[in-house]
Amino acid sequence: MERAPKLDGTLDDPLWQSATPMTDFRQREPHEGQPATEKTEVRILYTRHAVYFGIHCYDSEPSRIIATELRRDVSQDLDDHFEILIDANHNRRGGYVFEVNPLGTQVDGLIVEEQGSGFGTDFDPGWDGVWSSDAHIAADGWFATIEIPFTTLNFTHSMDVLWGVNFKRFLRRKNEEDLWRAFRRTFGITKVSEAGDLRGIKDIGSGRLFIVKPYALARYDKQSGQDPKFPLTGGVDVKYGLSSNLLLNVTGNTDFADTEVDLQPFNFTPFKIFIPEKRQFFLENAGVFNFSLGDQDQLFFSRQIGIDPITGNQVPINGGGKLTGTLGRLELGIMDVDTRSSGPNPYSNFAIVRLKESLWPGSYVGVMGIDKRSGNVLDLFNQTGGADTRLVFFKDWFVDAHMAGTRSPGNPSGASDVGASLAYRSNWLEGLVERRKTGPNFNPEVGFVERTDSDETYGDLTFKVRPSIEGVRELQFEAFMLHAPDTHGEVSTQEWQGTFRAEFNNGAYTDNDIADVFTQRITTPFHIYKNVFIPNGLYHFARHQLTYGSGQDRRFTYNLFERFGGYYGGTLNEFRVRGNYRPTAKFSIAASTTWDRFRLPLRNGNFSVVLASLQTNYSFNRFLTFTSILQMDTSNTQAASANLRLRYNYRPDSDLYIIYNVGTQFASIAPANPPQVRETRFAVKWTYSFAP
């Protein structure tokens, strides 16, 4: 087109009517392959510099359209929404995702190797692009208009363009998911190899990505036991597209003052606790560096860079660089980050290389290398290397395998990790068999491993049925068994569990552990609360769990959780409740409470721990938002913390933040609930993004 269509949340501009709409949407949920219950039309236009999408989501009951979220990059699972997948390189392995709700609110992210975020979302939301959207609810449904510049896609080809595309519509009140392609229940929008083809874009201008984003920061910072500081500082982030397939990120004097705070956990296990990454530099293209060792264990875990894993304190980052993308069938990720000395943390340098060679859809073979250099004379270096593969057969069978090793001063033996698994997924059955052996000295200091010295066998089987019961969508029956002695064959960890789940048409669910039986050997007393330590020994105990989540199509939603039974020679009763109320699109409030009641045959072994949080959000509009999080943790002598944040997105990818924080920003991932350093911080941060 010679000119861009109007982006006003309607399709009134005659240009939209010149495009042939795509309409053949089919259900993934609840009735796989059946025509969608509500009609959807998608129109596509383009100019030399951008591609445009005009979306009409017809609705027979427009008054029941759910639209409550005005904050960018916040989950829209409680809203009606629409997703666009663009595989701009047509490698059928990954792509960009752009999501919008009936208020025009944006969420975006990446799919890498046909994998979502791992936390229940279709894509990894760490990537942020510059694009425009508007939406409007009308008498026959809702409309959305979207502009995506070719620079956002880092797309430089100008002739014979071939993209992979797919579209997903979600109707919250019906809990219905409709897709244009890949509507099998085991697929979904992450199945990029099943996306459709888009042809006909030609004669376009260069879309090379080049963004410079400096920041300025003024803050007051007071840590417990230290004098206050008043630093004025600044830094810069740069994104540059070396080609359509390669992106270079460079950061200098990196700051994470605007990163969302962690909800404080209480760890009552003898193992590390996994807390997801939230910092923008590490989130972007994070899926490229993924190297799974099984469950939540990762060969590379970016929270080991710039955050003290024991105290949660920030460690200043001098700068870093990251190169991600593809060269033919080879996907690569290269990262180097340099941190400076801070408190007990010496200066360190981290270098990471990740390579994956694509085989066939969903399948690859890869290698990874990690090198950490440190100013700690007792731990001058730590090196990690590994190779892995994923093989997909007949679309429903998955073989995963890996082998990895570490090297540290003294070259201790038993520093390897080897594992393999076979999984099957269908609409009625899911199964997994896994073997993994982790040596006692396997020590990836830039990774996350819950336990070492383990020879693990794991099996899991889930049956799924969809009965003709009103209101019920699916029933699941799951059983798993874990047998994990140490590498000398001595009993260390055993668990078997039987679970019943029910999913209802309105999004409600129940998740109940009929029996969860543990055997656990404690070889080092671990701290659980104040002066209470679980002593060494071999423990046998059983627990039970009841969970209910309310329907997701209401303004007020809630979750109830109760787990009770034995715990290391005594008993533990865990009760959790969470409520979320969204009276308007501008205001929402969420409250949660966890009450853990311990009865242990130890001195001072009868105690309770209460964790509570209250989060409020007020959106003046899509671009000006206020968020507050208040937390309480009675296991800490200074139990209360608060985080207040005002964000003004005054232009695309440019923000002004005003932040007040009392407590800790990042939580410890270490076992035994170590004490954390509290801080009082007030910060004003300004960012400005521009294309030179």
Image: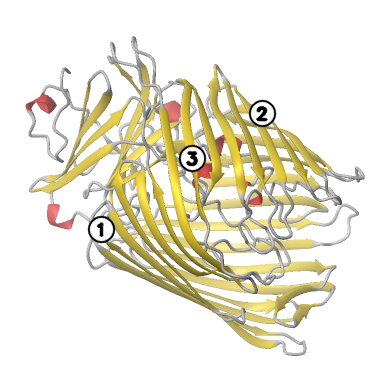
Counting from the top left corner in percent of width and height, residue 486 is at: 85, 56
Instruction: State the residue position of label 2.
Output: 366
Of circles 2 and 3, the one toward us is 3
Local secondary structure at mark 2: strand
Mark sitting earlier along the chain (3/1): 1
Q: Nearer the viewer, residue 333 or 344?
A: 344
Of circles 3 and 1, the one toward us is 3
| Amino acid residing under circle 3 | Val
Image: 428 above or below 626: above
Image: 32 above or below 47: below
Q: In this view, does 491 lie to the left or right of 574?
A: right
Q: Residue at x 78, y 39 (%)?
A: 383
Q: Please say if the residues under marks 2 and 1 sit with CB atoms less than 8 Å apart.
A: no
Q: Residue 236 carries which label?
A: 3
Q: Is residue 386 left or right of residue 691?
A: right
| Amino acid residing under circle 1 | Thr
- Distance from disc 2 to disc 3, alpha carbons, whole Å, reads 32 Å
Q: Which residue is drawn at 30% across and 32% down?
A: 180
Q: In this view, does 89 lie to the left or right of 296?
A: left
Mark sitting earlier along the chain (2/1): 1
Instruction: State the residue position of label 1.
Output: 68
Mark sitting earlier along the chain (2/3): 3
Image: 593 above or below 686: below
Q: Nearer the viewer, residue 655 or 622?
A: 655
- Distance from disc 3 to disc 1, alpha carbons, whole Å, reads 34 Å
